[in-house]
Structures are given as C-alpha cells and as structure tokens.
Image (tube, rainbow, N blue to C red):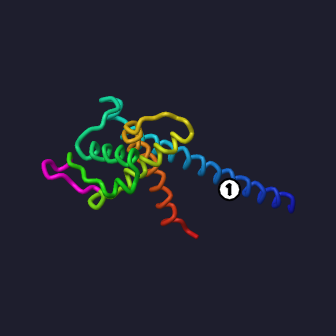
Amino acid sequence: MTTVNDNSSEYITNSSSSSAGLKSLITVIILICVCISGFLSRLFSIIRFESVIHEFDPWFNYRSTVYMTDNGFYNFLNWFDDLAWYPLGRIVGGTVFPGLMVTSGVIHWFFHMINIPIHIREICVFLAPIFSGLTALATYLLTKELWSKR
C-alpha cells in the first residue's frame, strides 16, 4: 500500500509540472501570435502603398529626425523650422516631444555603428510596426504583473 501511495504522489507531481509546462508553452505561442499580428496590422500600409511616409505629422517627424541626426541634439532643440506652420515658421525645440525623433536617431546611429547602412526614412517607416509588436508584449507583462497572485 505504501508503494502505491508513493507512486500516485509522484504521478500527481509529474502531471502538474507537465500541465504547467503546457500552460507556459501555450502562453508563449499566443504571445508570439499577438506580437506578430500587431506588427502585421501596422505593416499593412507599407505592403499596400510601399515604404512611404503618409500624412503631415509623420513627415514633420521624419524631417525633424533628419535634422537632428545631421546637426545634433543641441541644434535640434534650438532649430527654427521655416517650413512648418508656413509662413510663420515654428521653434521646434520647445514645441515638440522629441522622444520619437531621439529613438529613431539612436536606432540610426546604432545601425551605422555596426556598419549596416540604412536610410533614416526606413527606420521612421518601420518604427511603428516594430513598436506595435512590442506594445503587445508590454501590455501582456503589465497585465501579468497587475493580476498575478502572490
């Protein structure tokens, strides 16, 4: 009788560890699918209309990123853009949140440091699909942190 009891407790332990492994595998597969679908949903306009910058705000962000990578961050903060808000112009440094431009500039700098020649336009175009997939991952991790039982 003792042998049967020991074997059954070992079977229960093995079965619970395999179900935890299966649960983790399913979670990873679903998370990968959600990240890929988020990436592909933002990639749709690139597939349909080529790798171009649409609308006015993304075009301004692209021009700002090019200016920042060519002239440096300090000059970017003091830049007066006479093409924006024509005919008045715009003081860019004090009126924008430079996070998007800095992120694109850092990615551009990193690729050039490892000798991968890529145009800043390609980085600006593909940044939205990449961040869309990463947002799905960040949302999962935040939800897991908020709803986990400790």
Write the residue at 54% across / 44% down: 29
Write the residue at 20% across / 48% down: 82
Residue stretch in magenta: 84-92
* Neighbourhood count class around disc 1 (C-alpha, 10 Å): few under 14, some 14–19, many 20 upward: few
- On the rendered image, what quadrant is the N terminus found in? bottom right
Is residue 15 left or right of 65 when viewed as pictured?
Answer: right
Q: Nearer the viewer, residue 42 or 75?
A: 75
SS for callout 1: helix
Q: Position of residue 135 (x, y in %)?
A: 43, 52
Magenta segment, principal secondary structure? Answer: loop
Q: Quadrant of residue 95?
A: bottom left
Q: Quadrant of residue 96?
A: bottom left
Is residue 122 left or right of 53 when viewed as pictured?
Answer: right
Is residue 1 left or right of 63 when viewed as pictured?
Answer: right
Q: Position of residue 22 (x, y in %)?
A: 62, 48
**Residue where numbered disc 1 is placed:** 16
Q: Nearer the viewer, residue 79 or 57?
A: 79
Residue 90 colored in magenta in the image:
yes
Give the residue type that dot 1 points to: Ser
Residue 124 colored in magenta in the image:
no
Write the residue at 49% across / 33% down: 117
- On the rendered image, what quadrant is the C terminus found in? bottom right
Is residue 51 left or right of 14 when viewed as pictured?
Answer: left
Write the residue at 86% across / 58% down: 3
Q: Position of residue 137 (x, y in %)?
A: 48, 51
